[in-house]
Structures are given as structure tokens and as C-alpha cells.
Image: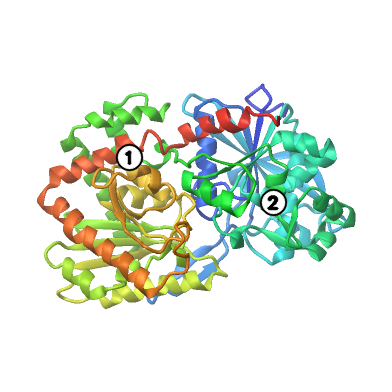
């Protein structure tokens, strides 16, 4: 055990993730996967659980987003100083990459829970003088580079991470949890250290991706170059190759004692993707304290003492006075609007119904569905006006995502005019702080992914804990959290690959989804908000006390301990 640690007991759980979101100023994450990882570890700290975590450092981060007036995205590196933000440790470890010994250093970040328990997060850094320029660059960019770069990074995370934990004295580990397949090579390290049976008895794997194309795979010749012929042969024997390529998810599945998806529906889809594999379901959650607005925290502290330490206390929101809830919601809304004005110059009206749509910009999330029939959108807002706040980054190589942002800007431009009743803003450089402001500051959370491509989704959970109901396609977590007209509303979308219709969207299915979206706004949501505010406030309260106690990481992490971490291979 590292003698400078404040926790004397050895960890039992090592949590590996390619990205971990800890603070906005630390560019160690890109989006939902990293945010989930950070929320998971914050919950483990709150609950006093014996966990440590491993990730890579990323000296140049993911990227900083820049949008011009037409919504065209460009990117620039994120400048930061790890030595000023993290705790450099003197410990080093070595991992072999392409036949070279790559030296790794470690930085530590301490997550302190509500009762003082600490969970250390170790970030691996390859910028050591002994390493070549290329090897030093391996901890520069998150999700950057070509296949060679990505595979080398995953060697550092998985195999280097196991070596670093041993060097740090993090003994007593009985579970290595892989948050997605990027860290799957830790199973090879464990198999070499002990045996394949040992690896299988100590590894747990969470898959997040409901489509085969989203799982990392690498060609055999590249694997031989990076890992060597002997290790490539071992990986084939361990079942890590699928259809001629090293498949990180297959490797993780074959050498894990427990495999789970991140929502009930996602687990069902994963069982179809991996026939014969027992894929359990542990639905994602969010760290409630991290994502509630200041005004909502104060309201909860007043009426639900203990909710910070135990999110199950959110069930007592059933008794929140509606008047006080409305006041807190108005304060959260104004906090968002203040930032919108500071960033864009746009002044939003706190009396106008405001919709939020903020997430990674990629085609299947369909950020532009709201503009499918611009004339109808404009008409339904004539008597009951709308404001819409968008945000989201597209991966630099995702041209479809970049095009999507431009279409949203074009849709907003088309709705401008002296008599327009729809005001739209798109906030650039979406991050944790902005995510908290938007999910807590709008009146309705819009989510309309193409089913079944939303494995879980957590932004709607953040909104719900803040009393913001969702209007959403019935996918991911919303299958479990939606009660029509009570916690929010469903967008009826006939394009459903899970149901057999096919994942490829047609003009007819897209129009049907848009028609359902407009109809719910026009006939249910807007009349309730403007004409029956007490009813809408009741829905806000329902979202908190029905969704909040379950869709949080306190519950999720305890499920992992009960279902995954305490199991042994039979």
C-alpha cells in the first residue's frame, strides 16, 4: 500500500475506464462513459467502499469545440498542467509495446465522499524521458490517432494499469472491473501473472454499446506488431479473436466472471449480440449531489435530510411543497439563462417554456428531429412560445455528427423572424458544468434517439433528479423510468430494431416520430405548463420522487457489490 495514502486498508475493487470525469477543468473525459465513471467513483466514496480506479492522463485532453455562426465545428487541444491539478507520485511501472519497454508514471486524484472516505484515481502518464517521442504521445489524446495509437493506448491502460497497481502496493484486489472493453487487456496481464482461470475469477465487464460497430477491434497483423506473436497466439487461445480480429469485448466477456449491460433493455440487446453469453442488467445512475442545482440542493436539504449520504431519501420528495419546488426550479432556470446570456448575448425569458437537448452530437441521437416540420413547430408555438437550449460536441472524425450540428443551426436560422415564437440557442464546448446547468435549468428534457441505439443514457436521469420531466423515445433507461403523464412523456417512434422493424430509419418512421413529438407538445405538455401550472409542478415532483431514488449511482454501485463484486466463478 502506498504509504502516503489516507486509507490503510487495501482495495478490493480496481475500476478501469478509458475516461473518468472528475472536474470540468480536468480534460480526462469526452462524454457519457467518463461521466458515468466519475459518478460511480463518487458514489463508492460516499458509501465508504474499498475501490480504486485507473485511467490514462491525456495531456492534450479530448478537444475544445469551436462553432461558427453556421454551426461548423473546429477543434483545438486543451491546455492544462497535470502537475498543478493532480498529485504526482514517484512510483513507476513498465509495459512492453511493440517490443519496447514503455515507462509509465502515475498521478493521483482523491475523491472524497460525503463522510470523508477517499477513493484514489490513478492516471497513467507516458511522458517520461526514457520513452520515445511516439511512446510519450500515447497519453496525449483521448480517442485520438489511428488503430495503432488506440491499441497501444489500450495496452497501457489494461496491462500497464495492472502493473502500476502492483507497483503502488494496491494489494488485496479481488475484482478488476472493466468499464467498456478498452481495458480488456488487463485480462491478459492477469492470465500471464497467474492463469486464465485466475483472470476469469477476478474480472468483471460492463458493456455499453448496443451495436457491433461500436466495439473496439484490431487486425491480427497489428496485434502481432504491438503485442508480439506469442501474446497474439495467447489471445486467440483465450477467445479474444472474433471474425479474424482482436475483439476487446469478446476478450473481456470470455475472461470475466460477470458481464452486464447498463439497462434492462440493453442487456436483452447484448444477449442477442453475444449469443450464449449470460449478460445481466445493472441500470446506470447518476451521482445526485453532483448534478442537482444549488437551489434544488437547498430545497432537498430542508425537506429530506440525509439525501446526500443516501439517495434513497429522494423518495420523500413526494411531500415537497409545490410552491417551494416552483421557486427552486425558477432559480435553477435563471442560473442557466445567466450563463446563456454571458456566453451568447441571447436573453431568454424565464416565463417561456424551455426545452433542453444536450448530448454527444452523433446521427442516431437525432438532434434535428425537432425541425422535421418547421412550419408545424412554428404554429404550435404561436400561442404557447418555446425556447430550446442545445449543446453537444461531435467527435472530430464524426462527419455525420458535425453535419447534425449544422442542421440544428440551419433549423434555428429558419425559425428566426420578428413574429417567431421559437427561440433557439446552441452552446459550444459542452462539459460537466454546462451539463449540470442545462439538465437542471430547463422545463423539459428532450431525448429522441433512434431505438435501440441508446444503451442507457444518463442526462435524463440528471434532469429528473432536478424535477425536469422527459419527453423521450422509449429506449435505454426511459423504458424503466417512464410513466406516461406522471414522470414525463413518450415519443411514439415506430423505427425499432429491437422490435424487428429495423434500425434503418425511413422517411415514414421519422415523420411518425416527429408527429408524435409535436402532438405531445401541442396537446399535453404546453397546455399543462401554461394553463395548469399546478399539474405541471406535480409532474416535476413525480420525476424526483419516482425516478430519483432508483436512477442514482448509490443504488447502482450497491448493485455491483451485491451482484458482481461478491461473485465467484462456479
In the picture provided, is 426 more to the left or to the right than 553?
left
Left or right: residue 559 versus residue 322 is: right
Dividing the picture into quarters, in which one does residue 120 lie? Answer: top right
Identify which residue is drawn at 45% across, 40% down. 285
Q: Nearer the viewer, residue 96 or 483?
A: 483
Viewer-side residue, 34 vs 505:
505
Q: Position of residue 200 (x, y in %)?
A: 73, 37
- Tell me, yes or no, if residue 423 can be seen here: yes
Find residue 370 and report its horizontal and vertical position in percent. Answer: 31, 67
Q: Can the viewer see residue 293 in this picture?
A: no
Q: Depth-wise, is mark 1 or mark 2 nearer the camera?
A: 2
Mark 1, secondary structure of its residue = helix
Tell which of 20 and 200 is nearer to you.
200
At mark 2, the secondary structure is helix
Find disc 2 in the rendering and name its residue. Answer: 250
Mark found first going from the N terminus, 1 or 2: 2
Q: Residue at x 61, y 27 (%)?
A: 50
Q: Quadrant of residue 320?
A: top left
In the image, 57 versus 210, the foreground residue is 210
Q: Which mark is residue 349?
A: none
**Residue at 83% in and 38% down:** 193
Instruction: Provide residue 349's location: percent of width, then percent of height.
Output: 19, 58
Neighbor class of circle 1 (other Cα within 10 Å; few <14, some 14-19, many 20+) is some
Q: Residue 529: percent from the left, percent from the top? A: 16, 51
Q: Quadrant of the N terminus?
A: top right
> Going by the image, does 390 lie left or right of 137?
left
Q: Which residue is mark 1?
A: 294
Quadrant assignment for the C terminus: top right
Q: How many badges with numbers are in the image?
A: 2
Amino acid at each position: 500500500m502506498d504509504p502516503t495514502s489516507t486509507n490503510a486498508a487495501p482495495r478490493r475493487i480496481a475500476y478501469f475506464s478509458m475516461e473518468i470525469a472528475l472536474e470540468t477543468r480536468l480534460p480526462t473525459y469526452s462524454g457519457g462513459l467518463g461521466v458515468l465513471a466519475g459518478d460511480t467513483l463518487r458514489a463508492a466514496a460516499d458509501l465508504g467502499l474499498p475501490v480504486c480506479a485507473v485511467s490514462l492522463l491525456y495531456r492534450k485532453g479530448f478537444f475544445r469545440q469551436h462553432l461558427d455562426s453556421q454551426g461548423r465545428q473546429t477543434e483545438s487541444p486543451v491546455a492544462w498542467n497535470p502537475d498543478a491539478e493532480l498529485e504526482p507520485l514517484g512510483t513507476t511501472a513498465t509495459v512492453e509495446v511493440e517490443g519496447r519497454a514503455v515507462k509509465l508514471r502515475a498521478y493521483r486524484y482523491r475523491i472524497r465522499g460525503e463522510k470523508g472516505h477517499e477513493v484514489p484515481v490513478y492516471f497513467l502518464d507516458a511522458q517520461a524521458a526514457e520513452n520515445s517521442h511516439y511512446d510519450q504521445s500515447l497519453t496525449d489524446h483521448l480517442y485520438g490517432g489511428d488503430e495503432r495509437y488506440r491499441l497501444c493506448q489500450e495496452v497501457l491502460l489494461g496491462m500497464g494499469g495492472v502493473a502500476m497497481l502492483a507497483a503502488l502496493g494496491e494489494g488485496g484486489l479481488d475484482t478488476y472491473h472493466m468499464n467498456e472493453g478498452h481495458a480488456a487487456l488487463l485480462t491478459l496481464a492477469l492470465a500471464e501473472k497467474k492463469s486464465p482461470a485466475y483472470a476469469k475469477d477476478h474480472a468483471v465487464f460492463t458493456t455499453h454499446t448496443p451495436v457491433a460497430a461500436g466495439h473496439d477491434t484490431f487486425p491480427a497483423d497489428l496485434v502481432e506488431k504491438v503485442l508480439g506473436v506469442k501474446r497474439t497466439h495467447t489471445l486467440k487461445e483465450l477467445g479474444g479473436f472474433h471474425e479474424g480480429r482482436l475483439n476487446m469485448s469478446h476478450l473481456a466477456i470470455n475472461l470475466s466472471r460477470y458481464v452486464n449491460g447498463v439497462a434492462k433493455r440493453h442487456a436483452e440487446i447484448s444477449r442477442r449480440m453475444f449469443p450464449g453469453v449470460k449478460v445481466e442488467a445493472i441500470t446506470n445512475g447518476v451521482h445526485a449531489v453532483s448534478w442537482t442545482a444549488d437551489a434544488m440542493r437547498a430545497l432537498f436539504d430542508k425537506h429530506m435530510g440525509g439525501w446526500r449520504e443516501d439517495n434513497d431519501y429522494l423518495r420523500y420528495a413526494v411531500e415537497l411543497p409545490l410552491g417551494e419546488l416552483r421557486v427552486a426550479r425558477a432559480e435553477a432556470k435563471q442560473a442557466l439563462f445567466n450563463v446563456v446570456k454571458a456566453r451568447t448575448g441571447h436573453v431568454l425569458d424565464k416565463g417561456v417554456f424551455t426545452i433542453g437537448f444536450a448530448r454527444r452530437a452523433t446521427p442516431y441521437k437525432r438532434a434535428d428531429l425537432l425541425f422535421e416540420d418547421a412550419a408545424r413547430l412554428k404554429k404550435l408555438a404561436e400561442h404557447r412560445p418555446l425556447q430550446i437550449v442545445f449543446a453537444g460536441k461531435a467527435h472530430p472524425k464524426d462527419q455525420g455528427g458535425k453535419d447534425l450540428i449544422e442542421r440544428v443551426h440551419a433549423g434555428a436560422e429558419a425559425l428566426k423572424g420578428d413574429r417567431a415564437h421559437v427561440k433557439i440557442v446552441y452552446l459550444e464546448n459542452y462539459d460537466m458544468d454546462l451539463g449540470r446547468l442545462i439538465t437542471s435549468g430547463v422545463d423539459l428534457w428532450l431525448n429522441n434517439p433512434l431505438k435501440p441505439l441508446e444503451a442507457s443514457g444518463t442526462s435524463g436521469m440528471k434532469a429528473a433528479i432536478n424535477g425536469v420531466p422527459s419527453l423521450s423515445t422509449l429506449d435505454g433507461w426511459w423504458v424503466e423510468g417512464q410513466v406516461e403523464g406522471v414522470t414525463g412523456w413518450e415519443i411514439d417512434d415506430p423505427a425499432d430494431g429491437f422490435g424487428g422493424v429495423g434500425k434503418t430509419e425511413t422517411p415514414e418512421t421519422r415523420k411518425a416520430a416527429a408527429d408524435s413529438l409535436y402532438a405531445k407538445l401541442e396537446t399535453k405538455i404546453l397546455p399543462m405548463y401554461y394553463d395548469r401550472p399546478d399539474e405541471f409542478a406535480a409532474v416535476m415532483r413525480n420525476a424526483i420522487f419516482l425516478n430519483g431514488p432508483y436512477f442514482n449511482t448509490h443504488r447502482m454501485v450497491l448493485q455491483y457489490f451485491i451482484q458482481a463484486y461478491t461473485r465467484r466463478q462456479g
